């Protein structure tokens, strides 16, 4: 969902897995069923902003991130240096969760923010590769960003899903 800010977590999951996600870490979630093949391996969760001025939103976001197998850290060229998201990101890193870093609202004049964000990631011991999502203007009534704008993020998620599927197959073989 597009702004206004997500107030209740929204989970996008496959029909077969949707029932597992009505509650995550004691947090009630709205579940939306999707049919993309990636949803057989991953469920995508849109949390309230981690640095929301509403304390409840922060608690919800932190709980969901603490329960995530993979964290997609989405920030903007205006907010990538904010303290609160970095605190939560460090927690995800400390427990070994893979992180995909996304710099949203990127324009040709955002190169300095992109370089600085990469440096900050390196300083935290993270890969400094960042998925850039370009600034785009949505038409009235649009409910999603153009797929071209998030193509690189989709590719990264497919890689993560593939890796998770391989791990799952290896676990099954070990149990047999």
Image (tube, rainbow, N blue to C red):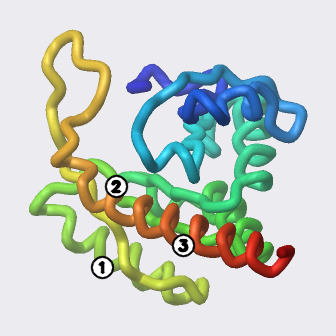
Q: Dividing the picture into quarters, in which one does residue 51 lie?
A: top right
| Mark 1 and mark 2: Cα distance apart in space | 22 Å
* Whether label 1 touches label 2, CB < 8 Å: no
> Which mark is nearer the camera, 3 or 2?
3
Q: How far from the left and from the top, in percent, is residue 129?
A: 37, 79
Residue 65 on image: x %, y %? 71, 52
Q: Residues within 10 Å of mark 1 (few under 14, many from 20)?
A: some
Vertical order, 38 against 58 (above or below):
below
Q: Residue at x 33, y 52 (%)?
A: 104
| Number of numbered callouts drawn | 3
Which callout, 1 or 2, points to the residue nearer the camera? 2
Q: Which residue does the numbered mark 1 point to in the structure image?
A: 115
Q: Which mark is residue 163?
A: 3
Going from N to C along the chain, the mark reached first, 3 or 1, is: 1
Q: Nearer the viewer, residue 40 or 5?
A: 40
The foreground one among 127 and 55 is 127
- Compare residues 9 and 115 and report the one nearer the observer: 9
Residue denoted by label 2: 154
Reading the chain from its start, which is encountered first: label 3 or label 2? Answer: 2
How far is disc 3 from disc 1 in space, using C-alphas? 28 Å
Measured as percent of width and height from the top left, residue 34 is found at 47, 29
Q: Residues within 10 Å of mark 2 (few under 14, many from 20)?
A: some
The residue depicted at 27 percent of the width and 50 percent of the height is 150
Q: Quadrant of the N terminus?
A: top left
Q: Residue furthest top?
A: 141
Outermost residue to the right: 26
């Amino acid at each position: 969902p597009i702004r206004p800010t997500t107030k209740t977590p929204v989970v996008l999951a496959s029909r077969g897995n949707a029932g597992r996600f009505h509650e995550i870490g004691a947090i009630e979630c709205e579940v939306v069923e999707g049919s993309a093949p990636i949803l057989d391996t991953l469920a995508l969760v849109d949390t309230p902003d981690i640095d929301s001025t509403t304390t409840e939103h922060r608690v919800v976001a932190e709980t969901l991130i603490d329960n995530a197998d993979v964290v997609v850290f989405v920030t903007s060229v205006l907010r990538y240096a904010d303290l609160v998201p970095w605190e939560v990101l460090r927690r995800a890193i400390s427990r070994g969760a893979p992180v995909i870093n996304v710099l949203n609202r990127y324009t040709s004049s955002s190169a300095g923010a992109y370089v600085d964000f990469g440096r900050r990631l390196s300083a935290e011991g993270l890969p400094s590769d960042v998925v850039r999502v370009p600034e785009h203007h949505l038409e009235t009534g649009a409910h999603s960003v153009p797929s071209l704008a998030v193509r690189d993020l989709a590719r990264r998620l497919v890689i993560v899903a593939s890796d998770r599927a391989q791990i799952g197959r290896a676990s099954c073989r070990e149990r047999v």
